[in-house]
Image (cartoon, rainbow, N blue to C red):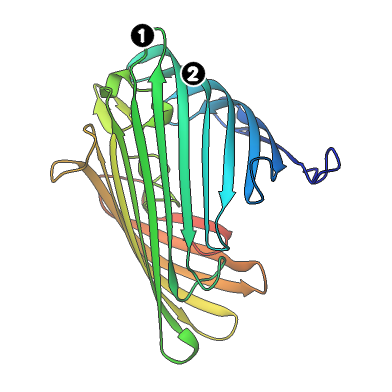
């Protein structure tokens, strides 16, 4: 990152990622370039330009995509900011429906409101993140709207919040095109550390013949009880459940799975906790057994 590119506090951020080295899957990766110009439209507004190229080799699909966009970011307070952008996105994808190309004029609107007492280890407060992605198809590609919501709440109990109840709800929906006419990069899967622990990453989707596609509707619910054993070490119990549906909203007939487990957290001052979770599938038809997760910071 360069924080003063032209002498006016312009921020240039370069990101690259490469994964799949030495695995049975193909190598995938991402290159992204973002330039932010502060106070362009007003003292609280940043104008930004974005270029991305990405190759995805996921469990149930592959995709190569390019994105160019221009947008604005406004900071309303220490707790609230918003972003909006418009750009062009082209995607060559192969999934359960075969190989297809998608071309979109994409919009993007995001608002984040953070009322947690800590970003790395909250014991009180709540967090809301809402994202809307309208996409307008070109050359026969269908148009629609993707909605993503992420809500988290925290409540401490006892002296110095030694016990914390934490909950998370994630909602996703693709409104408009049919499942087979939607880019797999816009669809939803469930499973893994970010949704349902105890099941492999993106293991739950929509059965299409002998293959699996992502869903247009998605809901994941997570609950944790976090208890301090001493000033550094905490014990966590958790339960996660996820739903995926071929329609835009989940229902009682949606595909579902769940998992539960225990975890340990070791506090590293200023950086959050070192996290270790052991999770077992409760429901959802898997033979994978016990799953192991390690990371930095709380799971949510």
Disc 1 residue crowd, few under 14, some 14–19, many 20+, Cα 10 Å: few
Residue 72, which numbered label?
none
Q: CA distance from mark 1 to mark 2?
A: 13 Å
Is residue 48 visible in the rendered structure shown here?
A: yes
The answer to which image quadrant residue 38 occupies is top right
Q: Nearer the viewer, residue 89 or 240?
A: 89
Is mark 1 in CB contact (under 8 Å) with mark 2?
no
Could you tell me which residue is drawn at 79 percent across and 46 percent down? 9
The answer to which image quadrant residue 158 occupies is bottom left
Name, please, the residue furthest toward the top. 139
Q: Is residue 88 left or right of residue 224?
A: right
The answer to which image quadrant residue 41 occupies is top right
Q: Which residue is mark 2?
A: 91
Percent coordinates x, y for residue 226 in the rendering: 43, 75
Could you tell me which residue is drawn at 60 percent across and 33 percent down? 20
Q: Nearer the viewer, residue 46 or 90?
A: 46
Which mark sits nearer the N-terminus, 1 or 2?
2
Percent coordinates x, y for residue 146 in the rendering: 36, 34
Residue 241 higher or lower than 232, as above or below: above
Q: Which residue is mark 1?
A: 140
Percent coordinates x, y for residue 66 in the rendering: 57, 21
> What secondary structure is marked by label 1?
loop
């Amino acid at each position: 990152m360069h924080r003063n590119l032209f002498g006016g506090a312009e921020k240039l951020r370069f990101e690259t990622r490469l994964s799949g080295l030495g695995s049975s899957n193909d190598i995938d990766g991402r290159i992204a370039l973002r330039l932010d110009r502060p106070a362009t439209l007003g003292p609280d507004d940043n104008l930004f330009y974005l270029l991305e190229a990405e190759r995805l080799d996921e469990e149930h699909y592959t995709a190569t995509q390019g994105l160019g966009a221009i947008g604005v970011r406004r900071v309303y307070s220490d707790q609230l900011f918003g972003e909006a952008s418009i750009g062009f996105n082209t995607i060559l994808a192969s999934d359960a429906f075969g190989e297809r190309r998608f071309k979109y004029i994409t919009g993007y609107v995001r608002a984040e409101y953070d009322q947690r007492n800590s970003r790395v280890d909250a014991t009180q407060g709540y967090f809301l993140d809402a994202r809307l992605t309208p996409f307008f198809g070109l050359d026969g590609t269908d148009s629609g709207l993707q909605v993503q919501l992420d809500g988290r709440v925290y409540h401490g109990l006892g002296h110095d919040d030694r016990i914390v109840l934490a909950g998370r709800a994630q909602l996703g929906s693709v409104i408009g095109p049919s499942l087979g006419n939607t880019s797999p990069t816009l669809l939803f899967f469930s499973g893994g550390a970010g949704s349902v622990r105890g099941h492999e990453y993106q293991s739950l989707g929509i059965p299409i013949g002998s293959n699996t596609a992502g869903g247009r509707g998605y809901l994941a619910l997570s609950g944790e009880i976090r208890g301090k054993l001493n000033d550094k070490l905490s014990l966590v119990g958790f339960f996660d459940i996820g739903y995926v549906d071929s329609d835009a909203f989940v229902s009682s007939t949606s595909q579902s799975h769940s998992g539960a487990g225990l975890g340990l957290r070791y506090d590293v001052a200023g950086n959050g906790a070192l996290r270790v979770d052991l999770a077992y599938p409760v429901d959802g038809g898997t033979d994978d057994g016990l799953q192991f997760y390690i990371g930095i910071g709380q799971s949510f």
